[in-house]
DNA sequence: GCCAACGTTGGC
DNA sequence: GCCAACGTTGGC
């Protein structure tokens, strides 16, 4: 069992949008960064727990919890010529971009703001608080995961 | 909207 | 394989 933080812009796709997907869940498409792709392809496993983080918005921070339901999916948006994530270099028989499927678990009673996360020594090693780290998703430890949820 | 700090691209 | 130019991310 691994723990992750996935970033999303709530104007595009928020924790509420994920909730509205109910049990069907949602495909986490559009990741176009190789390091993040490698996590999605090689490390994220079914039943892993994911903190959903809202970026580029009014309340930047951790907004909810999701669970991984399917792994090893070729990112369908890479094959869609109408998608802004379309990538002609990604072939169906040899996809460049991979992703997974998530299901909503919980919306936190409040958003745990980035500003708060930065204040705790316990979280100083987490990628999410580090300056200049532009990963759109990445691993956190169980200790960090539990610590963040205890801040609610 | 600004801009620092990245990642990616492409010429050489 | 270097590295300058460019594009993107993301907090503020």
Image: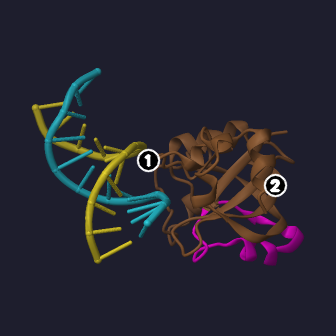
Chain colours: A brown, B yellow, C cyan
Q: In this view, does C2 lie to the left or right of A14?
A: left
Q: Which residue is drawn at 58% across and 43% down?
A: A127
Res. A94 in view:
no
Res. A130 in view:
yes
Between A86 and A13, the one nearer to me in the picture = A13
Between B9 and A13, the one nearer to me in the picture = A13
- Residue to which mark 2 is pinned: A150
Residue C3 position, x and y percent, is 18, 33
Q: Is residue A23 found inside the magenta-colored segment of the image? A: yes
Q: Residue at x 74, y 38 (%)?
A: A141
Which mark, by number, is residue A132? 1
Q: Is residue A8 left or right of residue A1?
A: left
Between A35 and A70, the one nearer to me in the picture = A35
Q: Is residue A25 found inside the magenta-colored segment of the image? A: yes
Residue A4 position, x and y percent, is 72, 47
Q: What secondary structure is marked by label 1?
A: loop
Q: Which residue is drawn at 56% across and 53% down?
A: A136
Chain where mark 2 sits: A
Q: Which of marks 1 and 2 is nearer the N terminus?
A: 1
Q: Relative to A62, is A136 above or below?
A: above
């Amino acid at each position: 069992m691994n723990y992750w933080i996935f970033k999303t812009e709530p104007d595009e796709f928020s924790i509420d949008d994920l909730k509205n997907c109910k049990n069907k869940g949602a495909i986490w498409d559009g990741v176009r960064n190789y390091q993040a792709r490698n996590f999605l392809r090689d490390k994220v496993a079914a039943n892993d727990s994911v903190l959903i983080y809202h970026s580029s918005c009014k309340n930047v921070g951790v907004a909810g919890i999701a669970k991984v339901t399917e792994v090893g999916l070729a990112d369908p948006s890479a094959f869609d010529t109408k998608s802004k994530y379309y990538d002609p270099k990604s072939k169906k028989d040899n996809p460049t971009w991979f992703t997974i499927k998530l299901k909503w678990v919980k919306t936190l009673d409040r958003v745990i703001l980035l500003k708060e996360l930065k204040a705790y020594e316990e979280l100083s090693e987490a990628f999410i608080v580090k300056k200049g780290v532009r990963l759109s998703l990445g691993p956190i430890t169980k200790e960090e995961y539990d610590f963040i949820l205890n801040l609610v």
